[in-house]
Image: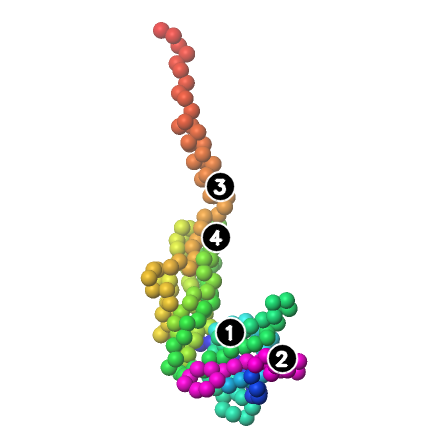
Amino acid sequence: MAKTIELEVTRRDGTGKGAARSARREGFVPGVIYGGGKDPETINVKHNVLLKQLKAGSFLARLVKVKIDDGEPQTTICRAVQRDIVRDLPTHVDFLRLSERSRINLAIPVDFINAEESPGIKKGGVLTVVRSEVELKVRANAIPDHVTVDLAGLQIGDTIKISNVDLPQGAVPTITDRDFMIANISAPRALVADDADEAEASVEAEAAPAEEDSDAE
């Protein structure tokens, strides 16, 4: 299960662009907590704290326990981070309140294991990753860190589809109309090139006119 982030914030008085600009000048990122059947709450997050969490990765796929001043922590998930288009620094952050029974759609990273036990890769095959993440509907109290794909036993030409993956309990793909591909073991480029050369030579041989018999009767 994904680890929970604990984030201490302060309540922001006032709304609108003026209050948001004032927060940024003081070293904060303005934000809002909404949903869960409660009124929205405007907050300020320390800029350096939020930036550190963003750089750590997977911030939008982890539960965030947001504590406003001395209040009780609220279970949330970050739904959006707006950034400055020039400096790429956060300028606003949105958090969605959750209950333990909430179900949400998240992009979960795919972790490929046991490449050394794949006969196809041992022969020079290449793991071609089609999806490095898969979007799953998961319970808020059971968000997985990743989805594991086991490469053991896979040969050149084998494909890994979502139906081949053991998903975490309670997690289901958001794409339900097809058995989509996650990765495959493709032939090494040298082998593909050799096959192409052989095919081309075969076509040229078939297209060449037959030589006439030089022995006259």
Residue behind mark 4? 126
Tag in front: 2 or 1: 2
- Dot 3 amino acid type: Ala
Spot occupied by residue 134 in the image (x, y as percentages of width and height): 43, 65
Task: Say if mark 3 contacts mark 1, CB within 8 Å.
Answer: no
Mark 2 → mark 4, Cα distance in angstroms? 50 Å
Task: Single out the mark in the foreground, 1 or 4.
Answer: 1
Name the foreground residue: 71 vs 163.
71
The three-letter code of the residue at mark 1 reads Ala
| Image position, residue 130 (x, y; %) | 45, 57
**Label 4 element class:** strand
Direction from residue 13 to residue 25 in the image, left or right: right
Decide: is 45 above or below 111.
below
User: Contact (CB < 8 A) between labels 3 and 4?
Assistant: no
Marks 3 and 1, how far apart at CA: 45 Å
Mark positioned earlier in the residue sequence (1 or 4)? 1
Q: Are marks 2 and 4 in contact (CB under 8 Å)?
A: no
What is the span of residues highlighted in magenta in the rendered image? 16-40
The residue labelled by disc 3 is 193
Graded by Cα atoms within 10 Å as few (under 14), some (14 to 19) or many (20 or more), the crowding at tag 2 reads some
Secondary structure of the residue carrying numbered label 1: strand
Q: Which residue is mark 2?
A: 21
Disc 2 marks a residue whose amino acid type is Arg
Q: Residue at x 49, y 41 (%)?
A: 193
Left/right placement of residue 29 relative to residue 36 reads right
- Tell me which numbered mark, 3 or 2, is placed earlier along the sequence: 2
Image position of 124 (left or right of 25): left
- N-term-proximal mark, 2 vs 4: 2
Residue placed under numbered mark 1 in the picture: 80
Alpha carbon distance from label 3 to label 2: 59 Å
- Give yes or no for contact between labels 3 and 2 (Cβ–Cβ under 8 Å): no
